[in-house]
Image: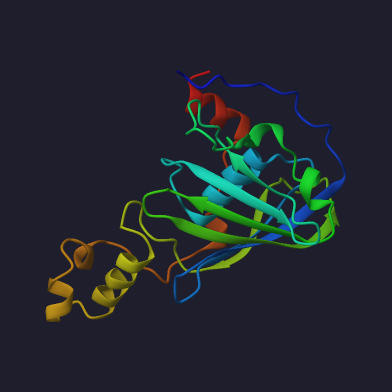
Amino acid sequence: MPLRLIHSEPATPTHETITFKVTLRHVAPEVWRRIEVPSEYTFWDLHVAIQDAMGWHDTHLHQFRVEDRRTGVSARIGIPDPDPLEGRIADQPGWLVTLDAWLARSDVSVKYTYDFGDWWEHDVALESRGTRDPTISYPRCLAGERACPPEDCGGPPLYAEMLTAHENPGTEHARGVPGWADRDFDPAAFDVAEVTFDDPAVRLRRVWGK
């Protein structure tokens, strides 16, 4: 059964922004980005901003897991499975859930997972709220460190092997990591000025052929 794309009216623009620090888990040295987004954003919009700021290609599924640690109320937000397993609660459509539906609560944990094969987990920490500057285009990336891993490199354990091979290219260990040691990849590279953001509405239409 094909997934039916549910359309929603865009939220009314506000004069506020939300700043997040997004940190890739289980990877050392730390890979992170600080992004500022409009407060009326949905979780789909935030997904696109995270993808673009981190440097992912958005070629795999994703999921947000949010939990109010004070009440224990939680949800999974992403792309609903059109045919979920019996007893499994389908993810809520990210394009229908606004950030403030959750982030207005007192003590909320947000985890973001990308690529259910490689399983890249990110901590998404709300750092501050601000006032929108009419001279600035949002979202924007404020800071960050290190390149995100290449797509489809096998997840954190194999990425650690890749980093070791990169640091020791002439060793026997590096020769045991097929292909990765010779890749044109600089794990320390990141330039905030090179980050560009796609329009999340355009991305949604492109992904679903609408």
Horizontal side of 67 relative to 27 (left or right) equals right
Q: Position of residue 17 (x, y in %)?
A: 80, 51
Horizontal side of 146 relative to 20 (left or right) equals left
Determine the residue positioned at 84% across, 54% down.
105
Horizontal side of 164 relative to 110 (left or right) equals left
Q: In which quarter of the view is residue 59 placed?
A: top left
One can see residue 170 in this view:
no
Q: Position of residue 26 (x, y in %)?
A: 46, 70
Q: Position of residue 130 (x, y in %)?
A: 84, 57
Determine the residue positioned at 62% across, 42% down.
77
Q: Give whichever of 127, 77 is nearer the camera.
A: 77
State which quarter of the image contains the N terminus. Answer: top left
**Snapshot colouring:** rainbow
Q: Give whichever of 169, 62 is nearer the camera.
A: 62
Determine the residue positioned at 56% across, 29% down.
204
Q: How many marks?
A: 0
Q: Is residue 106 above or below residue 2?
A: below
Q: Position of residue 6 (x, y in %)?
A: 63, 21
One can see residue 188 in this view:
yes
Q: Is residue 88 above or below residue 65?
A: above
Determine the residue positioned at 43% across, 45% down.
57
Farthest-out residue, front: 87
Q: Is residue 75 above or below residue 32?
A: above
